[in-house]
Amino acid sequence: MLLIKNGYCINSEKEGYFDILVDGNRIVKIDKDIEGGFDEIIDAKDCVVMPTFCNAHTHLAMSLFRGLADDLELMDWLNNHIFPAEAKYVNKDMVYICSKLSMLEGIRSATGCFGDMYFFEEEVARAAIEIGVRAIIGEGIIDFPTPDCKNPKEAVEKTKSLKEEFKNSELVKVSYAPHSTYTLSEDTLKMVANSLDENDIVQIHINESEREVELVKSQKGKRPLEVLNDAGLLTDRTFMAHCVATDDEEIELIKNKNAKVINVPQSNFKLASGIAPICKMVKIGIDVYIGTDGPASNNNLDMIEEIRTSSLVQKIKFGEKAMDSKTILKLASNFNGLFDGIGYLKEGNLADIAVVSLEGIESVPIYNPYSFIVYALNSRDVRDVIVNGRVILKNREFVDIDEEEVKFRVKELSKSLGGL
C-alpha cells in the first residue's frame, strides 16, 4: 500500500490537509493521520495533492517535427510541410520513441492521460503501457494513403483489430479517429459511422478555423458540423478538437447531441486559427476538455501552460469572471466518457494523483490553491506523479524510465531532418 501524507488536497471529496491511502490502483481512504504499515510513504508536506490532468487531444509522435515548420497558416502548415514530412519519416520505430518522449514531457506537467490521433497507434499503446500512463489511441483515418494504411477502409479495419488487442487493458482505450471533414468524403465518414459499436469513442478535428469551414462548404455545400451530423458521427461519444469557428446555432446542436469539445488554445493561437467559445459551451452544460494538440503545432505538451491560457483568453472574450480557476481545473481533469473513476480524489476512485511542491518562489504566498495551480504554477513544481497506483515520477525523477536514452534516440532521428 502507498500512503501520501500531509498534503493539501484539492479537487477532492475532502479538501484541506489529509492523507491519502492507495491500495493497488485505487484510493481506499482519505482521512487525517492515517496509521498502519505501508509499502511506500510519500511525504507531501508543503505540497498540493490533486488529480492528474487529461491531455484530451494530441499527436504524440509529432515531437519529431517540433519546430520543423512554424509561423504558418493551418492549411499551408499541413499540406506543404507536415503531410510531406509524415509521408517520408513516419514509421513504427519513430512513433514508438517519439511518443515516449512526449509522454515524459507531459508527465512533468502532471499529465497522466493522453488522447492521441496518429499512425501506428499500437506503438503509442506500447509506449504508454511501458511508462504506465493512460492513452486513448486512434489510428488516423484519411482519404489518402498514410504511413500505416493504404486507404480509409484499411484504417477502419485496423481500428477494429486494435480494439480487440487492447480490450482488457487498464491503461489503453481505442477510438476511431477520422481526421476531419475536409480530408474525408461523406461516404468515408458514413463508413466510419456504420463501423461503430454502441460505446465506441470518436476523435475528430472540427471547425479549426474559418478557412477550414469555408473549405468544407466549397467541397460539400455545408459546414463541418452539419457534415458530421448528416454522416451520423455527431453523438455523445464524439470528441471534437478545436471548435474555434463555431456559431451559436452550432453550439446548440453540440449540446443537443451531447457531443464533447476539446479546447486547444495555444495551437489555435500559433496557427492564428482563433479562440474557441468554450465559455458559452460550459455555461449551457457541454462537456469541455483541454488538450495541447501536437508538439509540432504548440510546440510543447505542458498542460499547466494550456490550462492557464484556456482561462486567460476566455476572460478577454467573455469578461474577467469567465473560466475561474476551479472551473478550468475541472476541465483539465475531465475524464468523462474516456475513463471512469478518475479526475477527482475520492475513496474508491482510481489512484491517478499528482503532488505539486509549494516550495518554489512563485508559490509564496498562497491564499487559494486553485488560483495558484492555474495562475502561478510551473511544471518544475510538479514533484510526484502516480497513475493507476504506480509511482511514475518521484522527487522530479522518473522511476524505471531512462529519460536520457529516449532523448538521445529522438535526437538521432531528427538529424535526418536537419536537427542539431
Image (cartoon, rainbow, N blue to C red):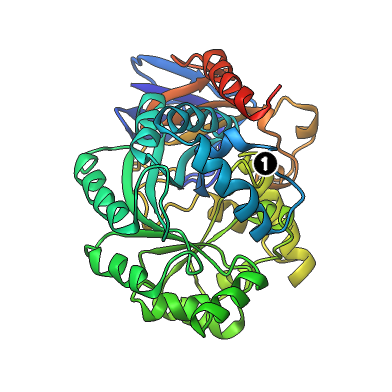
Q: Nearer the viewer, residue 306 or 222?
A: 222
Residue that carries the numbered disc 1 in the rendered image: 299
The vertical placement of 299 against 253, above or below, is above
Q: Nearer the viewer, residue 340 or 291?
A: 291
Determine the residue positioned at 43% across, 36% down: 352
The vertical placement of 128 against 237, above or below, is above
How many marks on residues? 1
Location of residue 47 in the rendering, given as x and y in whole percent from the top left corner: 62, 29
Location of residue 167 in the rendering, given as x and y in whole percent from the top left corner: 21, 44
Determine the residue positioned at 66% across, 73% down: 210
> In the displayed structure, does residue 410 sit left or right of residue 29?
right
Residue 356 can be seen in this image: yes
The vertical placement of 299 against 387, above or below, is below
Determine the residue positioned at 48% across, 44% down: 14
| Mark 1 secondary-structure assignment | loop
Location of residue 400 in the rendering, given as x and y in whole percent from the top left corner: 43, 14
- Decide: few, some or many residues near mark 1? Use Cα within 10 Å; few <14, some 14-19, many ≥20: some
Give the amino acid type for the residue marked by disc 1 in the picture.
Asn
Residue 209: quadrant of the picture: bottom right
Position of the N terminus by quadrant = top left
Q: Nearer the viewer, residue 358 or 222?
A: 222
Determine the residue positioned at 45% across, 41% down: 113
Location of residue 218 in the rendering, given as x and y in whole percent from the top left corner: 57, 80
Residue 51 can be seen in this image: no
Position of the C terminus by quadrant = top right
